[in-house]
Image (tube, coloured by chain):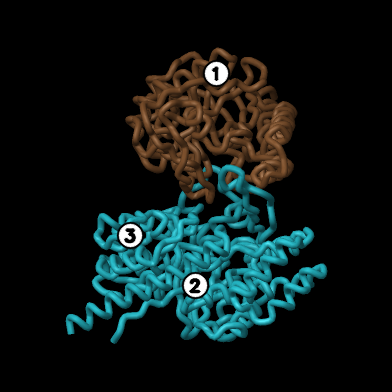
Chain colours: A cyan, B brown
């Protein structure tokens, strides 16, 4: 049987300027209209002329702007050649706020600095979180109606919601001078409630609506090594008894050594999609010394045998466009490190929201080309051996 | 009863106005001068808030500090702050230090415009600088050639206490080398070694003999039971949780301080368990107020 690698994105794409300005209440300028026209033509977005005309004539209702942004993003991913797509999270604010603003039990608290002059909005949990129902079913239906490709739905994980929130509920009493056990129990309960009462209803609704694949995003997963079992607990709780959809987890920019052995307890997890390219060399080569960003972590996958790996082959923090040959070599090294291609699929390190669409398009196109080149090498080698 | 000081060390959050000004600066919509004016207004408001709350030692909030390490790195030969690095489990980042030569402080960070004898300096501990440089220079080298001249300058400018911050020590160890490096520092101003965001129970015994006046303990990561009775150093008790938006009850803080005072004849200071910048500015301001109220309650208890 021939080797094939499934190619897909991780989640977010940047939002087009006309979408950003429309939601910020700022005027759409001629350059924004031209941008909508350029990408509409380039991506062959069906009916894009209608959007261009409307933008030029003063705009559209925000819900329609959102729909157009999704259609453009889906087409970008399709045209880049990906096998599995979504909509670049065009209808979401960002991964944390998307959930905190929807669920009951969270209240916004204000702005906190991330680094330098970059900031993010942070909320507090003030009571047991809950949700009125599934959050993203309409979003999924929209995507499914506008693509023939397989669809993967990214959802923010319970542990990351817990870790990125202030806690004014679970840890309120007895926190000062209290024991480590008490602090851990507060966090465990918080994670469990988000998983059971917010994410699980969403997952159930999505699977009923036909979701093929649920991806749980847990960027905070490895920041407290002792708490990786909580990450696993959140995943298993959210996805318990939800049918046949594929499930996976995305983690990035962390020390992955903390993940094992706890991740061996993830129920039926297809793979961990991890960031690797950010820590790798840009030189070609398939030896361990050529691939410093991959060797150590792949050793963990090889040693433990579970789960599969979503191989991050694009650095999302750089405009450097990885040549297809570099993608190819990263994949071939991983195949060698894991003793075969069966556990490997291919993706960027993380969501590409900080890159321009021009850069994203080139990066993703090269990722697909590199995957096809790696398949070619392996299939020829297999045929030669046969 | 031992004297009790109350202060809020570390980087203070930016107001929404300053947040917007810095965002505008990055997008070319305002000037550095306008940002500096807003920063100055923020600093003045913070000083007034501390005075009004009754804090003993004052800070200008270090509002132009991009992270704990950058100001010293930018003023030192041999250091560059570059790789963006996750700061523990805070969902924030700092720029790790690249050592490109022997680190040596050039011009010290200027003293804030605060009354002599009443202001507080915050600096990274030598061991924290070495950790931020991923071990490329030793804590001793950072102490002798970067921190010592800075502390000398602060002492000369009327600094009342230098808080040395090490967020890594309680989590990752290395206390022996950390203590050795502290011997390189001048003794002209009282030094307090603060250990934010870590369970200090494993290092308190060793730090009992460190050349510092006080040891800062995060009591949201460290159990009260972990503090030995009769601890020979002043405890700078991190009783205001900068990682929580929940507002502390001044009565609870005062009661906690009294418990500590009963157990620690060497004295207690009441402070924050890290930089207040981990909460939004309005929350931080209210936390400063509550820290001051706890101090007032304690003072009433002492005189009653």
At a point 71% along the width and 41% down the height, the residue shown is B21
- SS label for mark 2: strand
* Residues behind callouts 3 and 1 on a single chain: no
Left or right, B88 with reference to A173: left
Indicate the position of residue A322 as horizontal and vertical percent values: 42, 61
Q: Which mark is residue B154?
A: 1
Q: Position of residue B296 (x, y in %)?
A: 70, 29
Q: Quadrant of the N terminus of chain B?
A: top right
Q: Chain of mark 3?
A: A
Residue identified by numbered label 3: A294
Residue in the foreground of this view, choosing between B56 and B82: B82
Q: Mark 3: which secondary structure?
A: loop
Q: Nearer the viewer, residue B75 or B249?
A: B75
In screen coordinates, is A227 left or right of B289?
left
Q: Measured from the top left, where is residue B224 in percent x and y?
A: 49, 40
The Cα atoms of the two marked residues, 2 and 3, are separated by 22 Å
Identify the chain of the residue marked 2, using the numbered disc in the image. Answer: A
- Label 1 Cα crowd, 10 Å radius (few <14 / some 14-19 / many 20+): many
User: Mark 2 sits on what residue?
Assistant: A215
Residue B7, picture quadrant: top right
Between circles 2 and 3, the one closer to the viewer is 3
Judge depth for marks 3 and 1 and give the one in front: 3
Q: Is residue A206 above or below residue A117?
A: below
Q: What residue is drawn where x is 45% and y is 30%?
A: B125
Q: Position of residue B205 (x, y in %)?
A: 37, 32
Q: Are marks 3 and 1 in contact (CB under 8 Å)?
A: no
Q: Mark 1 near mark 2, Cβ–Cβ under 8 Å?
A: no
Circle 1: element type: helix
Kindly identify the residue that appears in the image at 46 percent across and 85 percent down. A244
């Amino acid at each position: 049987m021939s080797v094939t690698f499934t190619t897909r994105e991780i989640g977010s794409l940047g939002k087009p300027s006309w979408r950003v300005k429309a939601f910020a209440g700022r005027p759409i300028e001629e350059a924004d209209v031209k941008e909508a026209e350029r990408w509409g033509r380039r991506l062959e977005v069906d009916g894009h002329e209608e959007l261009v005309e409307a933008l030029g004539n003063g705009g559209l209702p925000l819900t329609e702007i959102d729909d157009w942004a999704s259609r453009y993003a889906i087409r970008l991913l399709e045209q880049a050649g990906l096998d599995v797509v979504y909509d670049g999270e065009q209808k979401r604010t960002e991964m944390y706020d998307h959930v905190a603003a929807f669920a009951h039990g969270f209240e916004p608290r204000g702005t906190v600095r991330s680094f330098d002059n970059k900031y993010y909005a942070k909320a507090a949990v003030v009571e047991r979180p809950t949700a009125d129902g599934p959050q993203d079913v309409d979003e999924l239906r929209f995507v499914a109606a506008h693509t023939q490709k397989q669809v993967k739905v990214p959802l923010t994980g319970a542990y990351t919601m817990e870790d990125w929130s202030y806690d004014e509920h679970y840890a309120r009493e007895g926190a000062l001078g209290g024991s480590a056990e008490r602090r851990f129990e507060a966090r465990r309960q918080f994670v469990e409630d988000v998983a059971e009462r917010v994410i699980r209803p969403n997952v159930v609704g999505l699977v009923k609506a036909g979701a093929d694949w649920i991806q749980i995003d847990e960027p905070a997963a490895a920041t407290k090594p002792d708490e990786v079992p909580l990450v696993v607990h959140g995943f298993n709780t959210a996805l318990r008894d939800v049918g046949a959809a594929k499930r996976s987890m995305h983690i990035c920019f962390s020390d992955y050594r903390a993940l094992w052995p706890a991740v061996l307890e993830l129920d039926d997890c297809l793979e961990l999609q991890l960031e690797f390219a950010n820590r790798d060399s840009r030189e070609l080569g398939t030896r361990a010394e050529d691939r410093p960003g991959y060797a150590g972590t792949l050793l963990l996958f090889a040693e433990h045998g579970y789960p599969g790996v979503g191989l991050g082959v694009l650095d999302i923090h750089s405009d450097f466009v990885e040549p297809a040959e570099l993608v190819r070599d990263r994949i071939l090294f991983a195949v060698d490190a894991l003793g075969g291609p069966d556990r490997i699929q291919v993706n960027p390190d993380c969501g590409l929201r900080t890159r321009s669409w021009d850069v994203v398009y080139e990066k993703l196109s090269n990722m697909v080309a590199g995957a096809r080149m790696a398949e070619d090498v392996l299939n020829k080698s297999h045929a030669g051996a046969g | 009863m031992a004297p009790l000081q109350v202060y809020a060390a570390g980087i203070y959050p930016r107001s929404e106005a300053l947040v917007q000004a810095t965002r505008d600066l990055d997008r070319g919509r305002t000037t550095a001068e306008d940002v500096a004016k807003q920063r100055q207004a923020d600093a003045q408001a913070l000083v007034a808030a501390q005075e009004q709350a009754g804090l003993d030692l004052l800070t200008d909030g270090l509002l132009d500090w991009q992270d704990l390490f950058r100001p010293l790195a930018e003023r030192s030969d041999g250091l560059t702050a570059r790789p963006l690095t996750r700061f523990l489990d805070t969902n924030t980042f700092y720029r790790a230090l690249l050592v490109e030569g022997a680190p040596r402080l050039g011009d010290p960070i200027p003293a804030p415009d605060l009354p002599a004898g009443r202001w507080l300096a915050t600096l990274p501990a030598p061991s924290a600088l070495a950790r931020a440089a991923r071990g490329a220079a030793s804590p001793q080298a950072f102490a002798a050639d970067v921190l010592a001249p800075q502390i000398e300058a602060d002492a000369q400018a009327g600094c009342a206490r230098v808080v040395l911050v090490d967020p890594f020590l309680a989590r990752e160890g290395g206390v022996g080398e950390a203590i050795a490096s502290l011997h390189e520092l001048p003794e002209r101003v009282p030094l307090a070694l603060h250990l934010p965001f870590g369970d200090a129970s494993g290092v308190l015994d060793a730090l009992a003999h460190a050349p510092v006046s006080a040891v800062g303990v995060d009591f949201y990561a460290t159990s009260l039971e972990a503090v030995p009775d009769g601890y020979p150093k002043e405890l700078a008790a991190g009783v205001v949780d900068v990682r929580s938006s929940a507002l502390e009850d001044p009565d609870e803080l005062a009661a906690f301080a009294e418990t500590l005072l009963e157990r620690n004849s060497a004295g207690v200071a009441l402070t924050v368990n890290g930089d207040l910048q981990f909460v939004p500015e309005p929350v931080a301001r209210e936390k400063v107020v509550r820290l001051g109220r706890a101090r007032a309650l304690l003072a009433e208890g002492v005189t009653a």
